Image (cartoon, rainbow, N blue to C red):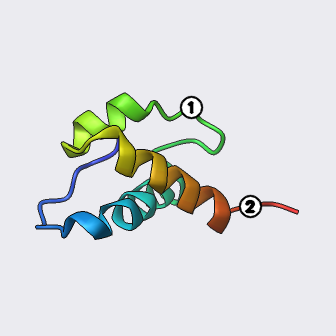
Amino acid sequence: MLTPSLITIEPKGMPRLLAEALESAVIFGELPPGARVIEEEVAAQYKVSRSPVREAAKISLSTWSYP
């Protein structure tokens, strides 16, 4: 399970921070590689709308793309 951070975040930086949280969850084994991430659950967990979660997914996919 992803653990929300207790820091104050600027709204425009939220997608990048969410992407880093998702990537860290995979790296540290909290989220198995290839696991389905349900955007509504992530949005509720971090108390954000679904839009930053979608942007975070795009960022993560572009960062972790495979050949």
**Who's the residue at 35% across and 65% down the image?**
17
Amino acid at circle 2: Ser
Question: In which quadrant of the rendered image does the C terminus lie?
Answer: bottom right
Classed neighbour count for the residue bearing mark 2: other residues with Cα under 10 Å, few (<14), some (14–19), many (≥20): few
Query: In front: 32, or 45?
Result: 45
**Who's the residue at 55% across and 62% down the image?**
59
Residue 11, how many percent across, how many down?
22, 63
Question: In which quadrant of the rendered image does the N terminus lie?
Answer: top left
Identify the residue position indicated by label 2 in the image.
65
Residue 54, how many percent across, how many down?
47, 46
Amino acid at circle 1: Arg
In primary-sequence order, the first of circles 2 and 1 is 1
Classed neighbour count for the residue bearing mark 1: other residues with Cα under 10 Å, few (<14), some (14–19), many (≥20): few
Q: Is residue 55 above or below residue 32?
A: below
Residue 16: quadrant of the picture = bottom left
- Toward the right, the furthest residue is 67
Identify the residue position indicated by label 1 in the image.
36
Residue 31, how many percent across, how many down?
50, 43
Q: Kindly report the distance in space between the C-alpha atoms of the residues bearing marks 2 and 1.
A: 16 Å
Query: In front: 12, or 44?
Result: 12
Q: Secondary structure at mark 2?
A: loop
| 20 sits left or right of 44 in the view | right
Q: Is residue 41 above or below residue 64?
A: above
Q: Is residue 42 above or below residue 4?
A: above
**Who's the residue at 27% across and 41% down the image?**
49
